Image (cartoon, helix red, strand yellow):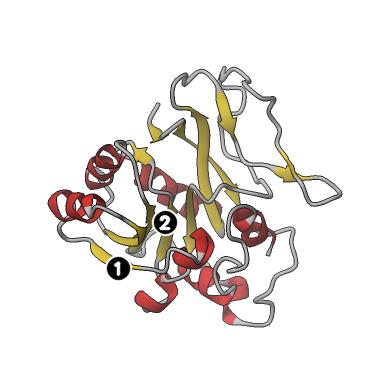
Amino acid sequence: KTAYEMCGRDWSSDVCSSDLRDLPDPTAGSPLASRRVEATEPVTVVGVVVVHEPGAWFVETLRALRAQNYPDLRWLFLISSDPDGSAATSIAEILPEALVRAVDPAIGFAAAANSVLDLVAGDNGLFLICHDDIAPDPGAVSLLVAEFHRSNAGLVGPKLVDWHDRSRLQSVGSGLDRFGEPDPPIEPGELDQEQHDGVRDVFVLSSACLLVRADLFRSLGGFDRRAELHGDDVDLCWR
């Protein structure tokens, strides 16, 4: 298995997708409604990492991002808080090709991630939205892009297991209950016995690592900027 690792979490390469096919389509009547990106097209992926006072794990995150084997992957780091400048220094040392921009620390993750809409032009690629504490296996982005092509999904994300104990599941995507609250298909601390491996449609994917079509993200206006702490991923996947 390959894995996305986070501080306290671990993403495996078993992919679940949220393709919005059963939801009202906000792009209905526009070219976006029926758009399909064929696997033969070269697709640029822009990784968007929101950085807020990262801990010791950040160097490991950067090394993992650098090790990705996807051929057309570029990184954008949006720094909301870096008091001692160590995060910016580490980025410059490990990923010198990356674009680094400062954002207002008061605006929250959702609004910070939306900065990609102003900084990156074009609708033909994919955005990989990331928290600053993931460490993907070298083939992880390639696998997500491959599944994006296979399923024609609007959004694709991986399975989440515990950082300290990879035998414990954290998330495999989620549904919603009648009150709009996440309704995960797993129990807290559930053992990963590959019972959830495989691709399936889900209602919600975590914003910790989320691959989304650039044109779709732009047409939706990105995340709801009012979501400062929680619910940004639920709202985006719902729309």
- Amino acid type at image mark 1: Arg
The vertical placement of 121 against 188, above or below, is below
Q: Residues within 10 Å of mark 2 (few under 14, many from 20)?
A: many
Residue 236 on image: x %, y %: 62, 61
Residue appearing at x 58%, y 69% in the figure: 225
Task: Return the residue at label 2.
Answer: 128
Report the Cα–Cα distance between label 1 and label 2: 17 Å
Of circles 1 and 2, the one toward us is 1
Q: Which residue is mark 1?
A: 101
Residue lying at the far bottom in this picture: please name it. 30
Residue 165 vs 223, above or below: the answer is: above
The location of residue 108, given as percent across then percent down, is 51, 61
Label 2 element class: strand
- Expressed as whole percent of the image width and height from the top left, the position of residue 70 reads 28, 50
Mark closest to the chain's N terminus, 1 or 2 = 1
Which image quadrant: the C terminus?
bottom right
- The three-letter amino acid code for the residue at tag 2 is Leu
